[in-house]
Amino acid sequence: MSSAIAPAALNDFGKQHVTNGLGRITEGVITKGNGSYVEYLDGKKMLDFTCGIGVTNLGHCHPKVSKAAADQCMNIVHAQCSIAFHEPYLRLIEKLLPAMPHPSLDSFFFWNSGSEAVEGAIKMARALTGRQNIISMQGAYHGRTFGAMAVTKSKTIYSDGVAPLMPGVFSIPFPFWHQHGLPPSAPDSVLTLQSLYQLDLLLSQQTSPQDTAAIIVEPVLGEGGYVPAPKEFLEGLRSICDQHGILLIADEVQSGFGRTGNWFFIEESGVKPDILLMAKGLANGFPLSGVVSRKELTDKLKPGSLGGTYAGNAVSCAAACAVADAFREENIMANVQARSRELFAFLTELKDDQTLASYILDVRGRGLMVAMEFASSEAPGAAFDPTTPKGLTVKKGMASRVAKKCIEKGMLLLTTSVYEVVRFIPPLNISQEDMKKGCDIFAQSVREVVREN
């Protein structure tokens, strides 16, 4: 038997043996996480404004969550969902019921990932309606498995070279100013009217209502650019679904679990989804997703039509129970709202700085799901887009260059969308001190990139 690989050689070992289909924003091996920070094998410590892409909402290795998982490991790790109920699964439902955005959402199925939750929702919608077609949003991200990939419209990278995708998928523009060729100042009412007009046209020209099973929407567009859906738009979708017997699927995989300052963003609109999807922050890093619907609907499903070897894993469910408790006991929502005000005030001040104003197009989001978009003369549709800066030549990739600077200065930050957007996803329990530290690093990085430009 060969000796173990030396720690210093692990990164190179990974490059050699981990598939090239995975991308990474840093070099190195993460060995430890604590709260708002991660540590690498070489000793560097990084402030984490990514949270594993919105997963560790309570920070890394939250003591109550980790203890709940460890304790569960000493009872039972794998209690297969098709064999019998297990207690953490049922306790989790008990804790989540009061957090649902509508009391009609009372029937739960737990799976492993957001993509699987999307797959389950599509399967349910087709089975329950007897219809095939699904309508999704331009800019949407729902996952990389085949059904989820088909309704994903944020980037072509996810489906390059793997067609044909799942048939029966159509899309409309999300009410985002880019998608209608309007300036960032375009009012929500105009964006909503344009998107609903396109939906009405789609139902007349491409997929008739009697062939349409569901409309799937991220209440906050995630990978498409961190764009909250206007209340009027979600209300419009609900009205059209009610009119035609179409199911409304709300994908809150990224925007759920306190990320926007509510348990789920759709609460703000008062709109009731027929199916609600959750994952990411649900179990603070343990693989778990949820598909929630109405019992009157799920009673129509055939037993055995849903399932999965690891679906609703006992350890993950125990961790999620502890997450729900921590949200309530530690006043997490109040911290989200306080830190959100600080972050938006900082980004708005940066945007209003006359030395930077021409480089920054927009600041948007909700809670601690926040984005800044930079100007670009090479963005998709720039030749036709009235927001394209005139007389300003901005090197391509400003968002990625800013994110790279942040990483060099000790903070993990992600870009998103086909536009020049950086996204802020810090822990929901981040301290005021660490929020200021992250903001300072970001400001320094932006100014350096602007000077280099």
Image: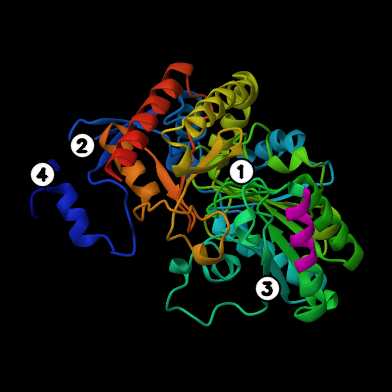
Name which residue type carries label 2. Answer: Leu
Front-most of residues 198 and 296: 198
Disc 1/disc 2 C-alpha distance (Å) = 31 Å
Label 3 neighbour load within 10 Å: few <14, some 14-19, many 20+: many
Marks 1 and 2 close (CB-CB < 8 Å)? no
The residue at the far bottom in this view is 164
Q: How is the image coloured?
A: rainbow
Q: How many numbered circles are shown?
A: 4
The residue identified by callout 4 is 6
Marks 3 and 2 close (CB-CB < 8 Å)? no
Q: Residue at x 22, y 44 (%)?
A: 28
The residue identified by callout 1 is 255
Which numbered disc flags the more N-terminal residue, 1 or 4? 4
Disc 4/disc 3 C-alpha distance (Å) = 51 Å
Q: Residue at x 51, y 27 (%)?
A: 349
Please provide percent x and percent y for residue 303. Answer: 73, 65
Name which residue type carries label 4. Answer: Ala
Disc 3/disc 2 C-alpha distance (Å) = 46 Å
Side of 432 relative to 132 (left or right): left
Which numbered disc flags the more N-terminal residue, 1 or 2? 2
The residue at the far right in this view is 243
The residue identified by callout 2 is 41
Name which residue type carries label 1. Answer: Ser
The residue identified by callout 3 is 170
Which numbered disc flags the more N-terminal residue, 2 or 4? 4
Q: SS for tag 2?
A: loop
Q: Residue at x 43, y 17 (%)?
A: 433
Q: Nearer the viewer, mark 1 or mark 2?
A: 1
Q: SS for tag 1?
A: loop
Q: Which residues are magenta?
A: 189-198
Please provide percent x and percent y for residue 95. Answer: 69, 33
Which numbered disc flags the more N-terminal residue, 4 or 3? 4
